Amino acid sequence: MRDLLAELPAVPGSEPIGDGAMVLRAAARPMADALVAAVDQIRAAAPFRHLITPGGRRMSVAMTNCGPFGWVSSHTGYRYQGTDPDSGARWPAMPTVFRDLAGQAAADAGYPGFQPDACLINLYEPGARLTLHQDRDERDLDSPIVSVSLGLPAVFLFGGLRRTDRPRRIRLEHGDVVVWGGPSRLAFHGVEALADGSHPLTGRSRINLTFRRAG
Ligand code: MD6
Ligand code: FE
């Protein structure tokens, strides 16, 4: 007899996308308004900016951070730091709704006890994209990453441990949460150029929150 129970996902609405990686569909929908309102507070204190890669290119995605550590890039390389290089001030505090959502999503995906100390916030406007990369600047690679999509949909590229592994294409919608860790923690991934459109909550943009344990 077919084992019907074994075919059900561990969490309703979850889809595995790799070893140790899954999408939790619509998991951030209930608190999406609060998340966007919190991003509005954060951007007022630490505005989105287009960082320069170590190779000298301006990133099409605009970024800011909240929490004890923020990810920054410049001509001198990538790093995490406790202050905003534009203002010299500490990054805005990580809102409780961010922390709670990240901890719950990680636990649902099989990573209990996740306490992020960094939240990178990415702003995509039509045409903005992120080329395939690995997230490897964090000191703690045992912790997973939790990634929350808000606003316009995007196509997420999820590859393997080698840059040349052909990536899967996964459509991420408003409220979807991706969690990955363990064997996929260093998987190459990226985001295709954002298609034009308008979303009731974010207008002509997509906002992505990625939570990590960096320090
Ligand atoms: C994005 N995300 O979805 C870009 N990194 O806008 C990432 O680069 C990312 O979603 C690590 C883990 C999950 C992610
Ligand atoms: Fe990434």
Image (spheres, grey):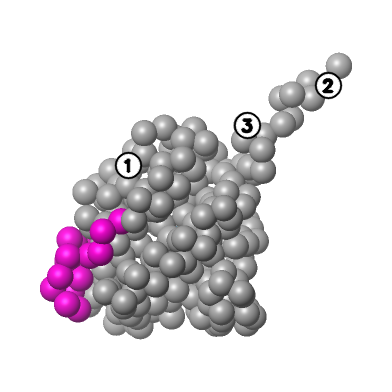
Question: Does residue 167 appear left or right of residue 43 in this picture?
Answer: right
Q: As displayed, is residue 169 above or below residue 15? A: below
Q: Secondary structure at mark 2?
A: loop
Q: Residues within 10 Å of mark 3 (few under 14, many from 20)?
A: some
Q: Amino acid at mark 1?
A: Gln
Q: Camera-side residue: 213 or 74?
A: 213
Q: Indicate the quadrant where residue 142 lies.
A: top left
Residue 79 seen: no
Mark 2 lies on residue: 2
The magenta stretch is 79-94
Question: Which residue is painted at 49% across and 75% down in the image?
Answer: 124
Q: Secondary structure at mark 3?
A: loop
Question: Which residue is painted at 41% across and 45% down in the image?
Answer: 100
User: Residue 85 in magenta?
Assistant: yes
Q: CA distance from mark 1 to mark 2?
A: 39 Å
Q: Secondary structure at mark 1?
A: loop
Question: Which residue is painted at 17% across and 65% down in the image?
Answer: 90
